[in-house]
């Protein structure tokens, strides 16, 4: 058995990046993710890597873009306000098909908001953010081990599809500690990148761009991107399905609320209520098919989020048309206790 | 088996240290562990609160509002958390800093009042109050003992303070002794 | 008959999209010639900003990365750190560098990033139709300063070459012009010098090029050359503002 070490979520993520072969980090300080740059500032130089305390999040994401265009693995991390500043760069990276990894340890907003755990950036990460018709792969860890493993996965998926992977975690997943295996569970590989800009020696000059002005060029580019996104949706969905076989109610939650829901589900089952959990691990691609299939049998659904109902819309779109969907949301840094989720389970069951 | 404890006080009292020792000792026993330090805005400004959950099954929530034990090292922490204690749970109150009149827990809560600061000063090091509290706490747990703590304490004490380990262990032993001698 | 001039190989044969009379095409030509004379085309990667310069990749046959508006210095930072053996240059206009991208250019320069920056100063936003730029001269009429730029409301034209020269990380900062053959030759020398700074790992190098925009200045191409001579150069003097002679920053 591989040895596990009691590790903080943000540290597991940073170490995961190093293990994934990421040698470039660029970032600007913001709470609650400062453990990540601090760890990498210390440890990247030890493996020959580069750490730059960038002048802004705008510069950070464009430095990631520059490394990504060179064919190497690079990342940045931030929280709400900083992630908003990166949206321009994210859109360009999507348009130019340049891979990279962006970590958002969410803080509550809008505006400067607060530093408490929240999930208010779901819509920004999954459905929007920057301009134009594009997608990012969005991974939602719910444990320290997943902070490590999904960071490695994020780099691999980014390279495989030439997309940006976003690790979307709340501050609690970033700050708490659990035993964690700090070695990859599979050999990390880096694909060939013949598209990377390394100088024209031995081949024709290459170009990475997102500007298409010719008639129909941009539409064709968009259709190509969409084809790629459909492939991601076919191949890369990850979700945890727990205690759903006999369930009369399905909780849908990601990140910290999914952990709290698990305790609430145990409490509910002790009282004889059959409750299960569907936990999306990839928020994009969203496990729509899995959710739909379960909702054909389990008509009662309770969505629990630390926001005012953002993933809720994806659940509504995915679920069977006769599904009875309840929502329990805690925005602005509110974290539900298990007994509060249990109360919502009872309400949803009695509906 | 499932056990959750909240340890609360202010920065510098060594709360993170003793909660880490508990978490690491539990890991050595192959238990699942979550360790969540200070969360939430109201915990800023020098407060230290740690939620430790131990279980022989997968742990769901890393937070709790029905802890089986509360280790209150000061009065602010006590007042904030004591209503969460249900009958059958444990309160260890540092009565060096908590006036007894402030302790108002539900009937059936087991209360252990220890003047840990005075005890630590009597042992020659006022910084050992946390370890005395840890000793008291472990005396009430069925699944961890002194040897389990000794096995991991070296992982928590920084290298430059290694020579304090024997003193820390003595303080844990003193805590065990105090708790053992008390009628609860 | 002796052939005394030919297109340098790294300059493509594509017709440029620049307006007739614009000196931007000359800037591209001398840049391509500099690259070829230094023999670095195989390992040079260009990063144009947004504006008239964006189509660099149609005219100069090297690897090219298109950067978001103003962010080319950050993209170049990432790229140079990932590939220190490559020659990386930015190609930015006044809006790109002197307005939206001031943060990125100042910090890349201040870090002493070992990159080269070509800055085209034509005192307006060219591609979007001649709006006022930070480099627009006092009194100059543009579509967004229709009564002429007034220092009391719009401030003064920004002098990038002088400003960047004050930063410790900068190895070379010069201003050149394209309005006369002699100046074109000096401009090419400055570009070569800037690339040599990078090749010798001296740090950040920048060449500001005064270039015409006869279309948006609403003058003929010949008159535009006079505008550089009589209006731009008096405010934006030509010269070398900083030139390192050794790796004294190390």
Image: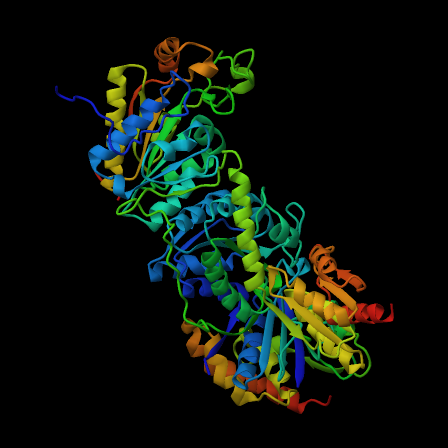
Height in image: A225 above or below B150?
A: above
User: In the image, what residue occupies the spot 42% across and 14% down?
Assistant: C214
Whole-percent x, y for residue A252 in the image = 71, 66
Residue sitting nearer the eye, C135 or C85: C85
The residue lying furthest to the right in this view is A351
User: In the image, what residue occupies the spot 58% across and 69% down?
Assistant: A143
Q: Quadrant of the C terminus of chain A?
A: bottom right
User: In the image, what residue occupies the spot 63% across and 60% down?
Assistant: A286
The residue lying furthest to the left in this view is C1
Height in image: B23 above or below A206?
A: below
Say how the picture is coloured. rainbow
Based on the displayed image, in which of its 4 quarters is residue A267 positioned? bottom right
Based on the displayed image, in which of its 4 quarters is residue B12 positioned? bottom right
Whole-percent x, y for residue B42 in the image = 68, 59
Answer left or right for C64 relative to A238: left
Does residue B61 appear anywhere in the picture? Answer: yes
User: In the image, what residue occupies the spot 60% across and 52% down?
Assistant: A125
Does residue A170 appear anywhere in the picture? Answer: no
Whole-percent x, y for residue A86 in the image = 53, 45
Height in image: A304 above or below B92?
A: above
Residue sitting nearer the eye, A176 or C199: C199
Report the number of numbered marks. 0
Answer left or right for B168 relative to A250: left
Height in image: C219 above or below B63?
A: above
Whole-percent x, y for residue C157 in the image = 45, 20
Answer left or right for C246 relative to A346: left
Residue sitting nearer the eye, A312 or C114: A312
């Amino acid at each position: 058995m591989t040895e596990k070490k009691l590790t903080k979520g943000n540290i597991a993520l940073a170490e995961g990046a190093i293990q994934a072969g990421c040698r470039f980090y660029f970032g600007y300080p913001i709470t609650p993710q400062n453990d990540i740059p601090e760890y990498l500032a210390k440890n990247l130089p030890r493996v020959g890597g580069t750490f730059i305390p960038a002048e802004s999040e705008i510069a950070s994401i464009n430095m990631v873009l520059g490394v990504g265009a060179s064919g190497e693995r690079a990342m940045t991390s931030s929280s709400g306000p900083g992630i908003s500043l990166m949206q321009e760069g994210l859109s360009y990276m999507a348009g130019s098909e340049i891979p990279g990894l962006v970590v958002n340890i969410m803080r509550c907003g809008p505006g400067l908001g607060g530093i408490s755990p929240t999930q208010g950036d779901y819509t920004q990460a999954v459905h929007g953010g920057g301009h134009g018709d594009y997608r990012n792969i969005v991974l939602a860890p719910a444990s320290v081990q997943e902070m490590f493993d999904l960071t490695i996965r994020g780099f691999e998926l980014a390279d495989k599809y030439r997309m940006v992977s976003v690790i979307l975690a709340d501050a609690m997943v970033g700050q708490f500690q659990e035993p964690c295996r700090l070695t990859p569970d599979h050999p990390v590989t880096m694909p060939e990148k013949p598209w990377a800009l390394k100088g024209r020696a031995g081949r024709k000059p290459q170009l990475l761009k997102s500007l298409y002005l010719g008639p129909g060029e941009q539409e064709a580019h968009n259709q190509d991107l969409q084809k790629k996104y459909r492939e991601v949706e076919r191949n890369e969905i990850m979700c945890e399905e727990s205690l759903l076989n006999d369930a009369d109610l399905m909780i849908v939650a990601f990140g910290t609320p999914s952990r709290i829901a698990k305790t609430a589900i145990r409490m509910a089952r002790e009282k004889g209520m059959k409750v299960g959990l569907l936990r999306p691990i990839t928020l994009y691609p969203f496990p729509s098919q899995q959710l739909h299939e379960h909702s054909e049998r389990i008509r009662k659904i309770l969505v629990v989020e630390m926001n005012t109902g953002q993933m809720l819309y994806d659940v509504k779109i995915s679920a069977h048309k006769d599904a009875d969907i309840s929502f329990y949301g805690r925005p602005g840094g509110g974290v539900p206790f298990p007994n509060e989720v249990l109360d919502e389970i009872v309400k949803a069951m009695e509906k | 088996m499932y056990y959750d404890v909240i340890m609360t006080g202010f920065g510098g009292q060594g709360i993170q240290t003793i909660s880490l020792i508990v978490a690491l000792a539990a890991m050595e026993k192959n238990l699942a562990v979550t360790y969540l330090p200070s969360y939430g805005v109201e915990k800023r400004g020098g407060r230290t609160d740690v939620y430790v959950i131990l279980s022989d099954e997968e742990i769901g929530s890393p937070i709790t509002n029905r802890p089986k034990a509360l280790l209150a090292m000061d009065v602010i922490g006590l007042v904030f958390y004591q209503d969460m204690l249900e009958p059958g749970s444990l309160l260890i109150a540092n009565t060096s800093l908590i006036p007894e009149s402030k302790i108002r827990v539900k009937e059936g809560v087991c209360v252990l009042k220890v003047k840990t600061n005075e005890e630590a000063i009597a042992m020659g090091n006022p910084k050992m109050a946390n370890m005395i509290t840890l000793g008291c706490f472990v005396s009430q747990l069925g699944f961890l003992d002194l040897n389990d703590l000794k096995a991991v304490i070296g992982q928590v004490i920084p290298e430059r303070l290694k020579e304090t380990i024997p003193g820390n262990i003595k303080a844990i032993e003193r805590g065990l002794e105090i708790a053992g001698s008390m009628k609860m | 008959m002796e052939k005394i001039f030919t297109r340098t190989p790294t300059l493509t044969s594509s017709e440029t999209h620049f307006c007739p009379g614009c000196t931007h095409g000359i800037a591209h030509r001398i840049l391509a010639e500099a690259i070829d004379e230094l023999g670095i085309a195989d390992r040079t990667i260009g990063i144009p900003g947004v504006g008239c310069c964006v189509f660099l990749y149609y005219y100069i046959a090297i690897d090219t990365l298109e950067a978001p508006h103003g962010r080319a210095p950050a993209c170049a930072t990432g790229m140079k750190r990932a590939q220190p053996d490559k020659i990386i240059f930015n190609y930015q206009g006044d809006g790109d560098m002197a307005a939206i991208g001031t943060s990125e250019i100042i910090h890349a320069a201040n870090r002493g990033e070992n990159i080269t920056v070509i800055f085209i100063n034509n005192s307006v936003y060219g591609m979007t139709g001649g709006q006022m730029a930070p480099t627009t001269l006092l009194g100059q009429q543009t579509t967004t300063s229709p009564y002429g730029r007034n220092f009391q409301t719009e401030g003064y034209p920004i002098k990038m070459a002088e400003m960047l020269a004050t930063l410790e990380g900068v190895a070379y900062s010069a201003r050149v012009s394209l309005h006369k053959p002699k100046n074109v030759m000096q401009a090419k020398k400055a570009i070569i010098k800037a690339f040599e700074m990078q090749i010798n790992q001296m740090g950040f190098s920048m060449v500001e090029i005064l270039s015409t925009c006869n279309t948006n200045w609403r003058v003929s191409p010949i008159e535009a050359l006079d505008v550089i001579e009589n209006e731009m150069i008096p405010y934006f003097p030509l010269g070398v503002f900083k030139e390192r002679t050794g790796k004294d920053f190390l």
